[in-house]
Image (spheres, rainbow, N blue to C red):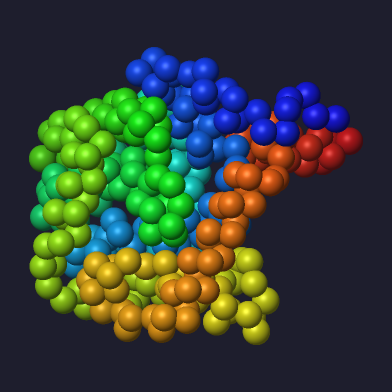
Amino acid sequence: MRTKPRKWIREELARLDPHQDYERIIALNTSYHMTDFLLDYVYAFTFPNFIAPQHGSETVLRGGTGKIYKNPNKRMDDTSRHMLIWWENGPSSPLTRRSVESVNRLHEHWAKTYPDNFSHTEDYVYTLCYEAAFMHRMRLRLGLSGFDEGTQTAAIEFWSRMALLFRNAGTGEPITEFPTTFQGVMDYMDWYEGRDLGANPHGADVIERMLTPFAERHFPKPLHPIARALVLGIYPPHILRSHGIKKPSPLTQRFARSFLRFGLVMSEKYAADPEETIGERHRRARDKKTAARTQ
C-alpha cells in the first residue's frame, strides 16, 4: 500500500532550499526513478566521456589486463555502486567519503604504473562537471526542459563539495578548480570536449567494453544490435570523434533519442513516483536473500 501521493517528489522538491537541501534535491532527482536497466544504460553512454583521451583509455584497458577488459560486467557494477552511494547520501556522508577515498586510493595505485596518465587535473574537473550537468544537457538534446534554477544551484552546491573529496592521483593535490556557477560547468565541458585530443587507438576497444555488457545483460542475443543502437545513437559528436566511431545513421540517432525521451516522459509525468531509492531496493532485496538462506 502506498504511503505517499503518486507524484510526491515534485511536491517535496518545491519545498526545499537548494543552498541548504542540495543533498536531498540531488537524491530526489537521481536515486528514486533510477532502475537497474537505466543504471547500466547511463554507464554505457557516459563512461566513454571520461576516457576519451588516449591516456584515459590506456589506463582502463591496461593492455588487455584491466577489469573493463577481463570482467566488464563487474567494472560496470563497481562504477555504478559508487555513483549510487554518492547520489543517495551526498558529500557530507561518511559512506560517500569512504567511497571516494577508495577511488582515490585505486587511482593512486595505478598512477604508480601510469604516472603521466593520472596527472591531468582537467580530466578530474571535467568528470565532476559532467556528473553535475549531464542530465541537464541530455534533456536539452532530447527537446525537454533542462534543470530549473533551483536544481542547477543544488548541483553546484553538491558537486563542488564532492570535488573537494578527490585528489589528483599523479600530484596528490586536491581538486579545487570546479566551477562556481552552473554556466561555468557548461562552459568547462564545452571547452574540454572541443579540444583536439588526437587519435585514440584504444577507442574502438573501449566502446566495445561499454556496449557488450549492456547488451548481454538486458537483451537476448538476437536483439543485441538494438541494444547497441540505443547507446551509439546517444553518443555526442566529440565521443564519436575521439573514439573513432562511425557516425550512426539519422535513423539510429532518432531511435535512441526517442527511446530515452519516452522513458523520461513516462517516468516523470505518468508513472507513480517510487517510495524507495534504488539503493534501498537493492538493500531490501539483499536482506530478503540473506533471510531466505538462513531459514
User: Where on the picture, by quarter, is residue 205?
Assistant: bottom left
> Quick check: 284 above or below 226?
above
Give me the residue at 39% from left, 28% from top.
150
Residue 2, given in percent of the width and then of the height, sits at 80, 29
> Quick check: 261 above or below 69?
above
Res 83 visible: yes
- Please state which of residues 283 and 52 is positioned toward the viewer in this rendering: 52
- Please state which of residues 290 and 185 is positioned toward the viewer in this rendering: 185
Give me the residue at 35% from left, 51% from top.
137
> Quick check: 179 above or below 35?
above
Image quadrant where one finds the N terminus:
top right
Image quadrant where one finds the C terminus:
top right
Q: In this view, does 20 lie to the left or right of 229?
A: left
Give me the residue at 13% from left, 67% from top.
197
- Please state which of residues 99 and 28 is positioned toward the viewer in this rendering: 28
Give me the residue at 18% from left, 47% from top.
187
Residue 286, given in percent of the width and then of the height, sits at 70, 39
Q: Is residue 249 left or right of residue 239?
A: right
Q: In this view, does 205 lie to the left or right of 228?
A: left
Tell how many labels. 0
